[in-house]
Image (cartoon, rainbow, N blue to C red):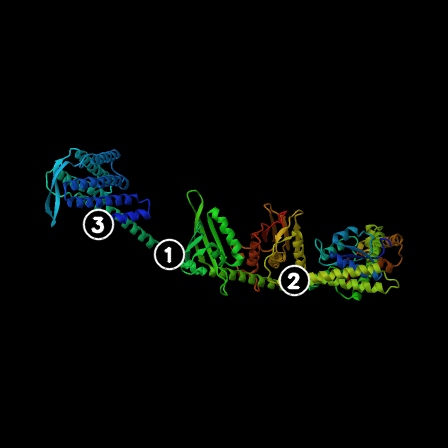
Amino acid sequence: MIAAACLTLGMMHLLVWCRQRDAVGSLLFSISAAAVAAMAASELWIMLARTADEYGTALRWGHVSVWVMMVFMVWFVRVYLRAGRAWLAWTVCVLRTIALAVNFIVSPNINYREITGIRHIPFLGDQIAIAEGIPNPWMLVGQVSLLLMILFTADAAWTVWRRGNRGPAIRVAGSMAVFLFLGAGHSALVFWGVIQAPLTPSLFYLGTIAGMAYELSDEVLRAAKVSRDLLESERRIELASDAAGLGLWVWDFGSNLIWATPRCRAFFGFGPQEPITYPDFLARVHPDDRDTTAEAISASIHGGRYEGEYRLAQTSAEERWISATGRVECNDAGFPRRMHGVCREITDRRRSQQEAALLRREVAHVGRVSMMGQLASALAHELNQPLGAILRNAEAAELFLMEPTPDLVEIRAIVADILKDDRRAGAVIDRMRSLMKREEIESRPIDTGDLLEEVARLVRGDAMARRIKLELDVDAGVPQVVGDRVHIQQVLLNLILNGMDSINGNMDGERKVSLRAGAQGDGVVGITVKDSGQGISEEKLAGVFEPFYTTKSNGMGMGLPISRTIIEAHGGKLWAENNPEGGASFHFTLNALRSGNK
Amino acid sequence: MTPNTPTVHLVDDDVSFLTATARLIRASGFVVLTFTSAADLLAVVSIGARGCVVADLHMPHMDGLGLQEALAKSSNPLPVLFLSGQGDIPTSVRAMRGGAEDFLEKRADKVELLEAVRRCLARDVREHAKREQRETSTNLLARLTDREREVLGHVVRGQLNKQIASDLGIGERTVKLHRTAITTKLGVPSVAELTRLVDLADAFPDLTEHFP
């Protein structure tokens, strides 16, 4: 029965050690338990002995299991409790080893010099054998070792108690000391002939085994609790992240497998148990975004952090956008091991951004079209130049052809000029058309001087009609700028027309609008439209760029906000100041063309 | 072709239009000089240049109206004909008030354009002659003393010697002496001719005001 119990416990912990090699405590325990089981077997053998010799032999072999038990128990205390003095432990083991050696040298065994006979006494309903004989003084070696072991375990118990681990102190070391004392004591009494009883040390040593087992299973229980807590914590994280709409994922580089929460899986359309590899994930990314995403991820594997946005490969009519961030975890050697990350669907946000951009373009377009009305006359003038030239040329040719010998060289020159002017007229119309179109902002090199002159030409007529002097001042070496010609002209026109409107009422003062352009260092070109009008009152200066601010009864108030949007889209700034001599100046900056650019 | 041949001075910053218009006007039998800016024109037009100016209204730096002003102030105010790609009323009114001969659109009829050019040139002949006459007359009258001038003023007003004498507080004989001197110096015997001379010289600008 005792044997069964010990063997069961021993097997259990042997298994534990097999599964987790660093649970050495479990191994030592299982060996000790096995030893006690063997001890119990020996006791049975002793109890069933029919002759003195049998008794003696059984007792002799019994000592082997005693040795095993003692050595391994001592070792257990040292390793598991990390307590007990080393020298004591060694002394115990050495003494016991000597005892075992003596046990096999001396006959019949270490306990009896001579067994004279056996008696049978009743015990638990059976007849069992008891020896009668002369005690062997060598027994003392073994018994001293047992005493020392008791001291050793007591000392270990004290150390562990002092450490604060009261539970293990009592359960393991304490119980060990107590039961060893009882067991050794009982056996000693039997051997020295003081009492007549069967040898049942295993009964007592079972107590120590029980103590150790309890402690070890406590460990197992604790581990189970920790794993339950972990599971609970994991579940909480999943719930929280799910509630926030986040999908969690972990990509193990070694196995190339990606663990993902159900929500994360749902984003990409993976099944709940489906194994996900990195190529699987990439396949679900929109083909247009695949390369940039893969590049960004590769770059981040060594850099540490990843952040990106991409579309999912289209499964339905709608486009879906995902925003993902990740962080790389390295092992001790600095080698990347895993990437942990979070992903979220941002389709709505993207859609709003796209709508906003569309609205902005619409408004800019409307602004442009409304300005077009004001420039219709200017463009008519522009067309009249080439058309007038064509007319005069044709009339001249008519006259030449009426001569008896027409000058063909001259006539050819005339025809060439007519063609050139026709093309010029076409270009004017194209420019007008492009002002009406909804174009994206292009980035091209633009000659700053040409740009300002072209705009000046457009407004000259209007300026003259209003008796406003239009002045142009372009620095000699001003660099080219990068941007969209049509859009920048729109800004200039808006500013100039505003300036002229401001001067309108000023009948007596100076009536001048001046355009200035110059390099401002730092690869920036500054352009200013300055008027001699009424200026802008201080409190309105900031609000002048807000939508719907207008002083005109038929104004829309969108010109300046649109202009600012255009300039900012070019990477520049637009702002207004009042002039000390009166009137206002609107300044804006554009990026200069850097030499060596494509 | 001497510098004094009546020349059409064409000025426009649009080279294409300038060349085409010059061709047409030349082919119609006129002498043409072309300029791409008002400043160029002003630099070249010398005191003896004859002819007219055909100018674009919208030019950078100095526009057509500015040119008109500069010419008017100069010693050789050639008549100006304006061509414009964009005819707005206020500007055209200003141009005419400034003394332009005409104001046409650039795409105006050929006949109209050439007519206007002819008128311009004719006007220059007239005005130039008038200026010359005025100069001559003024030089003549400069020969007179102050007193003689005074007497002349009264004479052309149609006053008799007696009236002149009493107005000036001098004797009738003195008046007669002055009149002889005037006639001799100016070489002009009749009062009518004297009047005409005074008119040409515009010697007494406030003359008409005294008509009761």
* Residue matched to label 3: A4
Q: Amino acid at mark 1?
A: Glu
Does label 1 or label 3 sit earlier along the sequence? 3
The answer for which chain carries disc 3 is A
* Residue matched to label 2: A432
Q: What x and y, as percent, mark residue A535?
A: 57, 54
For the residue pair A369 and B141, the one nearer the viewer reads as A369
Between marks 1 and 2, how big is the CA–CA gap?
60 Å
Q: Please indicate whether residue A505 sits to the left or right of residue A389 in the image.
A: left
Q: Amino acid at mark 2?
A: Met
Residue A575 seen in the figure: no
State which mark lies toward you, 1 or 2: 1
Q: What x and y, as percent, mark residue A118?
A: 12, 41
Q: Are marks 1 and 2 on the same chain?
A: yes
The residue tagged with tag 3: helix, strand or loop?
helix
Q: Quadrant of residue A429?
A: bottom right
Residue at image position (20%, 46%) is A41
Does label 3 or label 2 sit earlier along the sequence? 3
